[in-house]
Amino acid sequence: EDEQRVVSKYVYTSSWTYKAYEDYLMWRVYASRGIGVRINTTVKDFLASLKLENCKLFCAKVCYKNTAKQTTFDRLILKNKEYDSEMEMRFCIVPDKENVEKNRILVNVNPDFIKSVTLSPFESSNIVDMCRDTIHKLRVDLAVEVSNLLINNKF
């Protein structure tokens, strides 16, 4: 297999914005069908919540620049300059060789890292209720709010 396919198949990535505020365009891109959440936490709390077995974790801020030639590693942390408003942190989980062959990883996450949750401004009321119920089963004390972007601004 070529190197790019191996990385895309066996490296699991998660990107999080470190913006302190909601972004309408990010909601549009990443929750365009109405279902999506914004989790408020810190990198320190998120990393402390992870219990990884048989894999390694790499994290870094995404670097935004246009370049024609990229290594496979570069593709994990680089995005075109046009995306710099997303202000992302990327977390990459790489399973050890044995688990790559089994095509599995095991990641346990303690939900205490979550400070609050904001639901997509595009969610219907029945989806909002379902999301709240599901989140409160995970943590009854967690603050769950619906985005007010569409309430305050008529898009």
Image: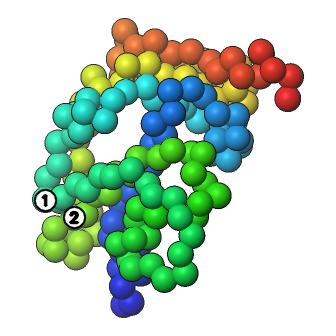
- Give 3 or 130, whichever is nearer the viewer: 3
Query: In the image shown, does 113 or 153 lie closer to the viewer?
Result: 153
Which residue corresponds to the image point at 28% horizontal and 69% vertical from the top-left?
Answer: 103
Q: What element carries label 2?
A: strand
Whether 36 is drawn above or below 88: the answer is above
Confirm whether residue 111 shows in the render. no
Residue 144 numbered mark, or none: none
Residue 116 lies in what quarter of the image? Answer: top left
As shown in the figure, which amino acid type bears the numbered disc 1? Answer: Asn
Whether label 1 touches label 2, CB < 8 Å = yes
- Residue 95's tag is 2
Along the horizontal axis of the image, is 38 left or right of 34? left
Residue at the outermost right position: 154
Please state which of residues 104 and 16 is positioned toward the viewer in this rendering: 16
Please report whichever mark, 1 or 2, sits nearer to the chain's N-terminal start. 1
Q: Relative to 125, say whether 51 is above or below.
A: below
SS for dot 1: loop
